[in-house]
């Protein structure tokens, strides 16, 4: 079994095991929230929706007809985008559990005619060249074993002139000392990440892939408080017992939340935000 196959299987198991509890406790959006200065009291679930809205505004996305949500989770972004734009959305995930739940949620929201989900590997997307006018990838790039191949696939399935909105966990740019490497190694093991790149390295890779109009920003200071809020909620007795009942995979993921919080505080983990376009013609 190849290294990428093993990684994908571990990712599948992690999300198969944890997605149900996440939805029950923390909701449909399996990503960070967004807080501006002065919004400390904003509810975490509201902040998660705000992250999607802020991304669209920042990237200048005001319309889309065909979208692929790469790493769709249980369909949080997919259904939001389908409803906001009246678009047809295809969501892909490695997790059959997530895929099934996303399809159920589409039916519950009467969006199953516009939002469809399937189990697929983002390194080999099951779509024709130039299929979509928006590729949306919100916190899934960190799982990709071959970042360059992943970005090539995103570029391939975009139509000429299509837009790419990409958010992923990044690391501090430059040389990392032994302590940094140890901390990242623990995050990799627990969350099944092969490696992460700096924002600067991703920017270079996007250019090498053929994207144009590349814009980047770092929203670490706007999202980092998410981990403290999730940790607090996970320590509530009713939730803690549910975490324990899910077994070792979910328990390790919960324990790693503290590591993520501290990594943001140290500036080791960064929240990279990217927008780019596929050239016309």
Image (spheres, rainbow, N blue to C red):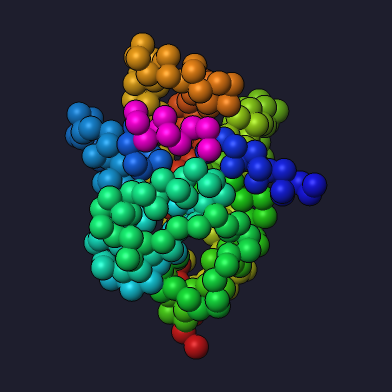
Q: Is residue 114 left or right of residue 68?
A: left
Task: Identify whether 188 is placed above or below 252.
Answer: below
Q: Is residue 212 left or right of residue 178?
A: left
Residue 217 visible (yes or no): no
Report if residue 23 lies within the magenta region.
Answer: yes
Residue 272 included in the magenta stretch of the image: no
* Residue plotted at (42% across, 19% down): 242
Quadrant hosting residue 110: bottom left
Determine whether 166 is above or below 128 in the image: above
Question: At 60% from the left edge and 56% from the top edge, which residue is drawn?
Answer: 121
Q: Position of residue 27 (x, y in %)?
A: 32, 36
Magenta stretch mostly in which secondary structure? helix
Q: Is residue 47 visible?
A: yes
Image spot of residue 126 (x, y percent):
57, 67
Residue 145 horizontal side relative to residue 221, left or right: right
**Percent coordinates x, y for residue 217 in the rendering:** 41, 52
Point out residue 202 in the picture as x, y percentages from the top left corner: 57, 56
Q: Which residues are magenta?
A: 16-25
Q: In screen coordinates, is 29 left or right of 5?
A: left
């Amino acid at each position: 079994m190849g290294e990428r196959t093993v990684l994908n299987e571990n990712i599948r198991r992690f999300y198969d095991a944890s997605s149900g509890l996440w939805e029950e406790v923390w909701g449909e959006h399996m990503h960070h929230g967004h807080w501006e200065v002065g919004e400390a009291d904003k509810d975490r679930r509201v902040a998660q929706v705000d992250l999607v809205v802020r991304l669209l505004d920042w990237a200048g996305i005001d319309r889309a007809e065909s979208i692929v949500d790469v790493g769709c989770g249980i369909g949080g972004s997919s259904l939001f985008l389908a409803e906001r734009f009246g678009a047809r959305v295809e969501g892909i995930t490695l997790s059959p559990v997530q895929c099934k739940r996303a399809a159920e949620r589409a039916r519950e929201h009467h969006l199953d005619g516009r939002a469809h989900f399937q189990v697929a590997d983002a390194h080999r997307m099951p779509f024709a060249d130039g299929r979509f006018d928006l590729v949306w990838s919100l916190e899934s790039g960190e799982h990709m074993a071959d970042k360059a191949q992943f970005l090539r696939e995103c570029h391939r399935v975009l139509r000429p002139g299509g837009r790419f909105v990409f958010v992923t966990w990044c690391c501090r740019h430059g040389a990392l000392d032994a302590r940094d490497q140890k901390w990242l190694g623990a995050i990799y093991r627990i969350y099944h990440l092969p490696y992460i790149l700096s924002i600067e390295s991703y920017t270079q890779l996007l250019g090498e892939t053929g994207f144009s109009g590349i814009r980047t920003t770092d929203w670490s200071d706007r999202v980092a408080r998410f981990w403290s809020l999730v940790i607090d909620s996970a320590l509530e007795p009713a939730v803690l017992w549910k975490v324990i009942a899910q077994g070792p995979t979910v328990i390790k993921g919960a324990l790693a939340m503290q590591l993520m919080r501290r990594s943001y505080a140290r500036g080791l983990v960064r929240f990279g935000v990217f927008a780019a376009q596929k050239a016309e013609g």
